Image (cartoon, rainbow, N blue to C red):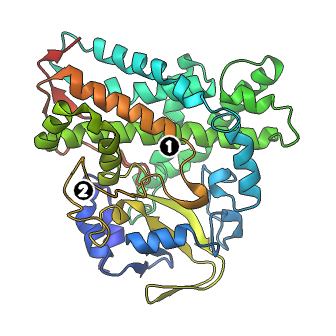
Amino acid sequence: MVEETPWQQALRYANRANPYPFYEELRRTPVARQPDGSYVVSTYREVVQLLHDPRVTSDQRKRPDTPSNPFEATIITEDPSEHDVDRRRMMRHFAPPECPQTIADFEPEIRRVFGELLNDMKGKTRVDFVDEFAFPGPVTVICKVLGVPLESIPRFHGWIEAALDGLDFGPEANDPEQQRRTAAVPDQVAEFRQFLAGLIDQYRKQPGPGMFSGMVNDGGPEGLSQQSIVRNAMLMLFAGHETTVNLIAHSVLNLLRHPDQLEKLRRRPELIVPGVEELLRFESSVQFWPTRSALEDIEIAGTTIPKGAPIFLAYGSANRDPERFENPDRLDLERPDNQHVGYSQGIHYCFGAPLARLEAQTAVGEFVRRVQNPRLVEDPPPYRRNQIFRGPRHVWVDIDGIRD
């Protein structure tokens, strides 16, 4: 039996709750070739270097093997100049300079959404802070931002979950049960695409609130095509659906695991801003991204990544690199110089980072302020299957009540 590499072990579902010992071993070889010919980059300095290296492509069409992926042909899988043009077309409906107040204007609604979720917990003594808080809050917000009807959440949630469960980059990819999940992905993605295409057609006929309508009815010289709008709409719902959910769920989990930090945040609520950055560093919502490859031979950390080779930049490992972060396995809400890569860096820096930060700051701040005497029921909790968007499936917490 062939011994598995640390990367292969980190990707096994049994190790989803704690991949960090395998990341620690992986960092001994900062750029490590895998049996399938891919290269995993696990140290902070090298990850950041390659995030800014134009010899690294995110466009799967430039790879010899061109794998199937739900995120194909979106801004996150494009290179300049195509990427720059499409991202600019989208950003003008979401962020400065054209829409400087979009995120700030949503703050009262975000507070209302999370406040009502906590109000709904009154009278309960046990709560699942994934199903009842970390999931419905961000998904409600992203639907309002994009212009997706809230009543459609159960439908697209099922498609997204099934599609993500079908992605496996580790040694279990060929297991019969995983192959069954993988075989279901094209149908799930096709249904999701059809749903969004129908919604976008509706906005073309009758404009409404939200970013999708703005993109569809953009009368500027650089309007997005229908196909591009649908593909990027899928990306925004995928990413907005998963990353902030996992950030909030992990934040609740890790504050309860570190009662000294929870109490510090309770005493000093102004620490919520640096605190959320530390919580994201500590548990990266996106562990790696699977679409990058080398446009030419790249010499880095004593290794040559050959032209055409797939490259996995392991954000989850880089954010625990002791060469960059002192005592990286310690949660420190006052950590100085916390330049993590939880939202990536370079041209593919997370499109929705400002919104995610505001949601997490609001949700975690209100959790700390209002939830009385929270105690973890199960640790570690069960995790979802997906390796990219790593997060707990449930976080059960016993509570004494909810403050007003």
Q: Is residue 230 above or below residue 2?
A: above
Q: Is mark 1 on a helix, strand or loop?
A: helix
In this rendering, position of residue 375 left or right of residue 112: left
Residue 88, can we see it?
Answer: yes
Q: Where is residue 170 in the image (x, y as percent from the top left)?
A: 41, 64
For the point 48% across and 18% down, the residue is 109
Give the camera-side residue of 337 and 177.
337
Q: Position of residue 27 (x, y in %)?
A: 32, 75
Residue 74 is labelled as none
Q: Which amino acid does label 2 sit on?
A: Asn
In this rendering, position of residue 138 left or right of residue 144: left
State which quadrant residue 384 falls in.
Answer: top left
State which quadrant residue 306 falls in.
Answer: bottom right
User: Is the N terminus in the top left, top right, bottom left or bottom right quadrant?
Assistant: bottom left
Give the camera-side residue of 314 and 84.
84
User: Is the C terminus in the top left, top right, bottom left or bottom right quadrant?
Assistant: top left
User: Earlier along the polypeptide chain: callout 1 or callout 2?
Assistant: 2
Q: What residue type is labelled 1?
A: Ala
**Mark 2 highlights which residue?**
18
Q: Is residue 84 above or below residue 374?
A: below
Residue 393, can we see it?
Answer: no
**Mark 1 highlights which residue?**
353
Q: In this view, does 2 lie above or below 378?
A: below
Q: In this view, does 290 lie above or below 92?
A: below
State which quadrant residue 256 falls in.
Answer: top left
Count neighbours of disc 2 (C-alpha within 10 A) and say few if under 14, some if 14 to 19, many if 20 or more: few
